[in-house]
Image (cartoon, helix red, strand yellow):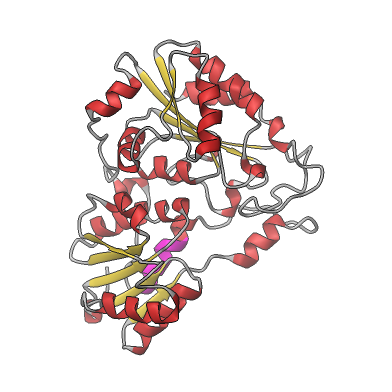
Amino acid sequence: MADLSTKIKHIAVMRLSAMGDVAMTVPVLRAFVKQYPEVKLTVISRPFFKPFFDGIPNVEFFAFDEKERHKGFLGLLRLFKDVKKLKIDAFADLHNVLRSKVVSLLFALSGKKRATVDKGREGKKELTRAENKIFKQLPTMFERHAKVFSALGFPVDLSSRSLGTEFPKKAVLSAEITDLIGENYQKLIGIAPFAQYDSKVYPLDLMQEVIAKLAENKDQTILLFGGGKKEIEILDSLSEPFKNVINVAGKIKFQQELKLISNLDVMLSMDSGNAHIAAMLGVKVVTLWGATHPYAGFLPFNQTLENALTSDRDQYPKLPTSVYGNKIVEGYEDAMRTISPKQVVKKIESGI
């Protein structure tokens, strides 16, 4: 338990981007408020991510106004003053970038306790370098986030035994959603086939095979997730041949999408934000890994390595070549083809 002499009753928590990274903070905050119900948390993040934190007890959301009020160095001063007014006792920097460091320093100068996440950059370099690679499991981002709170005097137990039933219940689906997906299904399977970088995206022809095989079972409804005009067009082409495959991208608002994801029996995702969103909602997630690898610490929360299908390192020994998938290595473009559609379908159907 926290040292009562610290008198910390209100912690500001900062994590701005990207979507998957913000989603990864949610299970840790859920565990925190369960274990320390007397402490309030205020999350500083982009307004778009507010729905992630809705319904978590003792958690308030503070919108970071990147374009106007909190823009630039003067904006960070305003952010500090805005948040300080909330009677903050400590500052948890879960981002560790220039902006969060500035705000953290301002809180330290005002006499408040602070702690910053260690992203483990050295270990990640050793994991992803081509020569003298050290291929081992690194601490997860959830463990790294928990260490920040531990440094403030609040050790957080992330074990499933400790968390118990801390995942949110399946959301009630609105008429708009049920009109979109229908009601005649026994199992809901989500598929999010995209990622920020091509090196993390399963080849489209293989994904078509996965979808076709899953669609053979008429008791299963397959929902496709994505965003942006190009992705929506691709998802339309993937869903078009099948009555029980539905592209939901661009058809419902983000909050509704979260409610729909909470009702999935399983989510198939790349190493991307949708994997972490599904995991934070307590959904089983099967992930596919190309240039990246779960050993870097980004396996979705409470998921098993058995459900993370990785590209063949015997054929592609330099894997993982990147932490985030943003490095292109010649000759490694087809690494994900070593994950067969049959493997993927078997993994999805074995657990639902």
Horizontal placement of 37 versus 183: left or right? Answer: left
Q: Furthest residue to the left?
A: 38
Locate residue 107, reporting x and y percent.
Answer: 35, 82
- Report whether residue 46 is seen: yes
The quadrant where residue 103 appears: bottom left
Magenta stretch, residue numbers: 144-152
Taking depth in this image into account, of 293 and 278 the one nearest to the observer is: 278
Locate residue 329, reporting x and y percent.
Answer: 77, 49
Residue 146 is a magenta residue? yes
- Report whether residue 307 is seen: no
Locate residue 297, reporting x and y percent.
Answer: 54, 53
Residue displayed at 55% across by 36% down = 230
Locate residue 299, reporting x and y percent.
Answer: 52, 46
Residue 318 is a magenta residue? no
Prevalent SS, magenta region: helix
Using the image, determine if residue 56 lies above or below residue 87. above
